[in-house]
Each structure stands twice: as structure tokens, then as C-alpha cells.
Image (cartoon, rainbow, N blue to C red):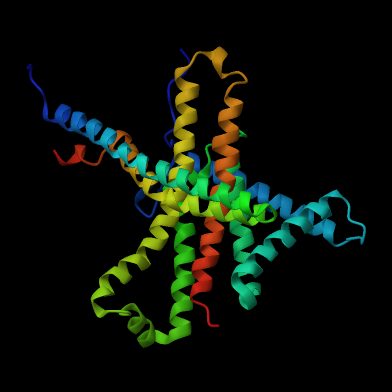
Amino acid sequence: MSNITNEGLILACSAIGAGLAMIAGIGPGVGQGIAAGHGAAAVGRNPGAKGDITSTMLLGQAVAETTGLYGLVIALILLFANPLLGKL
Amino acid sequence: MGNEVDFMIHGYYKLNLFGSEVYITTTHVCMFIVCMTLIVVGIIVNRYMKHASSIPGKLQNVAEFYVETLDGIVKGNMFHHWRKYADYILTIFMFILLSNLSGIFGLRPPTADYGVTLPLALVTFFLIQFNAFRTKGVGGYMKSLTEPIPLLFPINLISEFATPVSLSLRLFGNIMGGTVMLALYYGLLPRLATLGIPVFLHVYLDIFSGAIQTYVFCMLSMVFIADRLPE
């Protein structure tokens, strides 16, 4: 291996870390899909309450998406506003 | 290939306030445009409603529809204290909705900057804490943090502070994600593929996602504030 500078090592490990942070996207995908399935079953049982069921389901899904967004924010920070470079 | 991929905030003009350097950035310009649009629309609707007729014209119809629908939602969540908080909720609903939708008009949405969403969430946080202190008193509020077991005091304290953090990060992450994906699409594909096809991306990322995030922000603000109000 040729010379790997300290800065190159930090950037490479940040890129790997950004990719690992996006694995947090599995959780909201599975959870929101299950919630949408329950919502569709509820509309099938009670077609008159479709408006209420839809808005409750959308509210719950947007709250459940938050943890996936935390992963996205960490990945964006590592790629574009890396705070570890200044600590060399 | 198209232009460069660019979604960062640029500083346009450097000022020198009280000895430190301050920039006028993209977010300042876009927020100025959004706020001026809201002020102009507000003045026009105000002048128009002074001559309100009982058979409403188009502008009066839209204004009444907006206020009545959102007043109904606030009333459904906050019961008999709704009149005090309806102004705040309707104002931030309109501001966040127009900010999220301004991506279609070529602006960089001001809510894609954490320095805009954090103050919005902090205002809600101060409303929640103020109401909690006013309802229960200082001693009663500290005591309620140690329920049901005194061992849970740090967890209750952290969950109090997690509320504005999660509110602001949810809005910021959704809109910033949309901005990044659209900048990647426009930046990396040849010119021909950016005519007409991005419409579907804009519809999902800007319109649908922006409207849902507005609704969620306002609903969660109302639910958290109503949780601390006296019965």
C-alpha cells in the first residue's frame, strides 16, 4: 500500500460510516409497511371511516419515520460537513 | 453531463456586525421571498374581507375554507382552550407549507436549513414548558417528573428535551432529503432527461412529502401542548 495520509484515512472511514448509517432505513420501511397493512384492513372493515383512518395512519407513519431520518442526517453530516477533519 | 451537483447553502454578501463576520445566505433570501409573499397575500385578503358579502366570491371562499378547516382541527385537539393557540398553529402551518412547496418555484426551501426548523420547534418547546409550569407549579412539575418511580427521573427529563429535537429533525431531514435527491437528479443526468420527467419526483418529494410534514408538525405541536393544559 502506498502512503495513506491521515486525512485520507479519515475520509475513507467517514464514507464507510455513512454507508453503515443508512442501514437504519430498514426499520421504518418494515414498520410503516405493517402499519399500512393494518390501515387497509381497517378501511376494509369500516369503509365509512376512511378519512379518519387515513389521517391517523399518515400521522403515525410520519412519527415512525423519525429514526430512519436520524440515520440520513448522520450520513449527510459525515459526507458533507465532516467535523472529524478539523481534529487532525 | 449536466451541471455540478449543488445543494449547499451559499453566502452572498458579507456584513460586519459588532466585530464578527456574518453572511447573507441563500436561506435568508428564500425566507425573505416566502415571508413577503405571505405578507402581501395577508394584506390583500384583509382589504378584501372588509367588504365581505354573504355569497362569497373566490378569494373569500378560499380564505374562509382555510380558517374554518384548521379551526376545526385545532378545536378537536385542544377542546376549550383552542382560541388562544389557533393563531399560532394557523400561522406556522401556512409558513411551513409555503416553505416546503417553494422547491417547485425554483427556490431552495428555507426549511432545508436546520437554523429555520430548530427555532420553530423551540417555540413549541417553550409553549409546552410554560404551560406545564403554569398548570402544576414548579414543585408539582418536578414531582411529576419522578412519577411513577423516582428512578425514571433522568429518562423523563431526556424525553422532555427529545421533543423539540425530534420535531425539528423530522422536518429538516425530510425536506433536506428531497433537496439532495433533486440536486443529484438535476446534476448528474444530461440536459434532455431533466425536461418533463422530474415532474413526478417533484410531486412526490416536494408536494406530497412537504404537505404531510406540515400536517404532522402542527398535529404534534397541538397534541403536546394540549397534554399540559389544565382540564
Asked whether B102 or A21 is in front, the reply is A21
Asked whether B137 or A56 is in front, the reply is A56
Across and down, in percent, residue B206 comes to 57, 38
Across and down, in percent, residue B90 comes to 64, 60
Q: Quadrant of the C terminus of chain A?
A: top left
Question: Residue at the spot x=44%, y=62% of the render?
Answer: B122
On screen, residue A36 versus residue A51, left or right, reads: left
Residue B159, above or below B209: below
Is residue B3 at all visible to an observer of this figure? Answer: yes
Q: How many marks?
A: 0
On screen, residue B169 versus residue A38, left or right, reads: left
Question: Residue at the spot x=47%, y=43% of the render?
Answer: A33
Across and down, in percent, residue B139 comes to 35, 87
Asked whether B30 or B106 is in front, the reply is B106
Residue B148, above or below A60: below
Question: Residue at the spot x=46%, y=30% of the render?
Answer: B181
Residue A43, above or below B229: above
Question: Residue at the spot x=53%, y=49% of the render?
Answer: B213
Is residue B106 at all visible to an observer of this figure? Answer: no
On screen, residue B175 versus residue B22, left or right, reads: right
- Give the farthest residue toward the front: A45
Q: Quadrant of the N terminus of chain A?
A: top left
Across and down, in percent, residue B7 comes to 44, 32
